[in-house]
Each structure stands twice: as C-alpha cells, then as structure tokens.
C-alpha cells in the first residue's frame, strides 16, 4: 500500500498489522547527498529509501563488502547511523566505506556499496542512484516534515489464502479518504508492465518503418515487372481486355507472390525464436516462455499484406493508361517495317 506525502495514521497502521503477518514501512524520496562543508562540498542527486528492520520481506540485499544489513545500517563507531550507496553515486562523490556524507541535516557513515536490492523492479521511477538508510535515522534530517515530497510504502506479508480483492475493499470502506494505492503479487511491478508495453509499441513502429522501406522496394519491383509487360498489356487491350481486367490479372499475380513472401516470413518468425530458445533463455535475466503465438503472427501477416498492397497499388493503376497504340510506337522505335507499311 502506498501513501503520498504522509505516513499511515495509528488507526491505519493498526488495521494493517491486524491483517498481515508482517508489515514493513518504507519511505522513498529524492534528496541531495552532500560530502564536505560550504564551498568545498560535493553534491549529487540520489533516490533515498528509508527502511525498517523488517525489510526486505522477500529476497536478500547484496552489499560490498558483504556485511549484514542490520550492521550496515546500524550505529557506527563514529556515533552516526550507517548508510549504503549505489556504486555510481559513491564513485561520483569519491566515497569509500568509513566516509561521512549528509542527507538534509543528518550525517551518515558509508558502510558498504549497494550491489542489488530485491525490490528494485517494483520501485517507482528514480531520478538518481539509490541510497539506503534506516527510516528512524531520518527523523532528524528535516527531509520528512510538512510540505516535503515523499512516498510511504507498506509491504504486507499476508496469511495464505487471503482474498486480496476483499482486503482492498475492506480498506476502502474503513478509510475512504486515505488516497492509498494498492498493489499485490498478481501485478507486483506495474511500472515494468508499462515499460514492456512501451517497448512493444516502439518495436511495432520500428517494424512498420522497416515495412515502409521494404514497400519502396516492392513498388520499384512492381514497376520494373510491369515495364517488361508493356507489350503484353497492349496486346491484351488490342483483343478487347479492359483496364479493369488487366488490373485484376496483375493484382492476382502480385497477391500470389505476396502470399508466398508473407507465409515464408511467418514461418521464419515462428521458428527462429524457438530454435534460439536455449541460447536466449540462458542469457535473459528473467524466465522466458517461447512458443508460437497466433495473434502476433496474424498481426504481422496483416501488416505485410497491407504494405504490399499499398505500395503496389500505384504502379498497378498506371497499367490502365497503357494503350494498344503502344505496339505501333514500339515497333516504329525498333525499326520494324511491317507495322509501318514498308513491305
């Protein structure tokens, strides 16, 4: 459950704890990490996450050096709370374990570098590298007061068999004006869903661009083919074929070639990923399911047929302008005397 610009009230927190096995409170916000004082200070934007002792509910945090999280975020020999940073941010500020940095008005000691965090995929968009500290250590930082911008997240480990929809409905009935946003394990990372959807839309646009470039080649090939058939078309018109009939004849020919090309493309598009599945599965960071999906294949077939039709339509339409007199003009140009009455 996520709240914006505030933490859960005691009544809300009690409601959550009554229904969950474990509740973890996290606060997430942007701030400036500062090293040094006054004009000699160095600053860098960071996405701060304040966690409690229950975090993470699932998974493990990887630190460098590999110290326990409670030790890394707990009190240090300097009498200051500990904190961990993403390597990019630590390098930007020139920090090594044991150095002091500041968030707001609170000093922290860098105890380790943050290699990975288990819930990074479910986090909202960040504007800077991650800094991880204890939630209670931010109490004197003046970064979580009235008017400051932050999100509070409450992770709930629920008993097995909990009705997730009923739980959210009960919350909204008990606290109708809370403004809370819910997310559960059925869609744990909607940001990733949106990212994948946008990448899919981008790839569709890239594919359409490729089809448009290929369509130019289709148009050129159709023009070249029809140019070689000029005399044939003129002969057909001499025997009384209408422009519509000639258009339909060559449209059927191009349609047959298009069908062969589309079918070949669909076969390649379906079989190549299956053939490369073992190699791709070993390299992808998430499980992947390879198979034949009729919906996308049908969509690809429609795009291919429409591209061929659109780019072949204009050259085909020009066949209506070819006249029977072309035979006489071409014969004259080639020096054929029989059509000029020379014999």
Image (cartoon, rainbow, N blue to C red):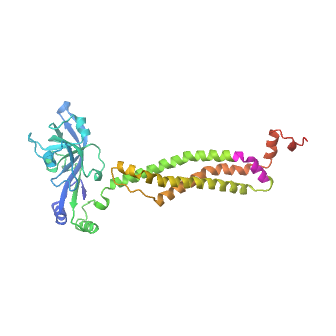
Name the residue located 49 percent from the left edge and 57 percent from the top edge.
Answer: 297
Q: Where is residue 141 in the image (x, y as percent from the top left)?
A: 16, 45
Quarter of the picture holding the N terminus? bottom left
Q: From where the camera sits, is residue 140 visible?
A: no
Image side of residue 19 versus residue 124, left or right:
left
* Magenta-drawn stretch contains 22: no
> Which SS does the magenta portion mostly show?
helix
Quadrant hosting residue 291: bottom left
Q: Which residue is drawn at 43% across and 52% down?
A: 200
Tell me: 191 left or right of 318: left
Q: Nearer the viewer, residue 94 or 27?
A: 94
Image side of residue 173 versus residue 256, left or right: left
Instruction: Tell which residue pokes out farthest to the top in this image.
Output: 40
Question: What span is colored magenta in the figure?
Answer: 226-237
* Place of residue 308 in the rendered image (x, y in percent of width and height, measured from the top left): 59, 52
Q: Where is residue 314? Give x, y as percent.
A: 65, 49
Front in this rendered view, residue 46 or 306: 306
**Can residue 226 be seen from the camera position used here?**
yes
Q: Does the magenta stretch include residue 232?
A: yes
Q: Where is residue 317 in the image (x, y as percent from the top left)?
A: 68, 51
């Amino acid at each position: 459950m996520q709240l914006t610009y505030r933490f859960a009230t005691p009544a809300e927190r009690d409601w959550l704890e009554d229904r969950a096995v474990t509740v973890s409170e996290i606060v997430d916000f942007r701030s400036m990490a500062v090293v040094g004082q006054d004009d000699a200070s160095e600053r860098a934007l960071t996405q701060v996450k304040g966690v409690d002792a229950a975090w993470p509910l699932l998974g493990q945090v990887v630190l460098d050096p590999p110290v326990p999280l409670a030790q890394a975020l707990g009190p240090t020999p300097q009498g200051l709370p500990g904190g961990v940073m993403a390597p990019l941010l630590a390098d930007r500020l020139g920090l090594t374990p044991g150095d002091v940095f500041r968030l707001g008005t609170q000093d922290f000691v860098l105890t380790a570098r943050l290699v990975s965090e288990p819930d990074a995929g479910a986090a909202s968009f960040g504007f800077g590298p991650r800094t991880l500290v204890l939630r209670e250590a931010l109490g004197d930082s003046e970064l979580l007061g009235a008017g400051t911008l932050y999100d509070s997240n409450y992770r709930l480990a629920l008993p097995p068999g909990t009705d997730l929809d009923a739980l959210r409905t009960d919350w909204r009935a008990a606290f109708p004006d809370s403004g809370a946003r819910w997310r559960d394990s059925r869609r744990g990372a909607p940001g990733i869903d949106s990212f994948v959807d946008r990448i899919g839309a981008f790839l569709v646009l890239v594919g359409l661009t490729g089809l448009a470039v290929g369509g130019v080649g289709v148009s050129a090939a159709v023009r070249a083919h029809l140019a070689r058939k000029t005399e044939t078309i003129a002969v057909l018109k001499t025997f009384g074929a209408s422009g519509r009939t000639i258009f339909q004849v060559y449209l059927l020919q191009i349609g047959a070639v298009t069908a062969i090309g589309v079918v070949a493309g669909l076969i390649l598009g379906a079989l190549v990923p299956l053939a490369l599945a073992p190699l791709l599965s070993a390299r992808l960071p998430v499980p992947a399911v390879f198979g034949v999906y009729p919906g996308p294949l049908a969509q690809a077939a429609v795009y291919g047929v429409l591209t061929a039709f659109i780019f072949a339509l204009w050259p085909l339409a020009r066949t209506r302008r070819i006249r029977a007199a072309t035979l006489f003009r071409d014969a004259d140009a080639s020096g054929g005397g029989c059509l000029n009455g020379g014999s």
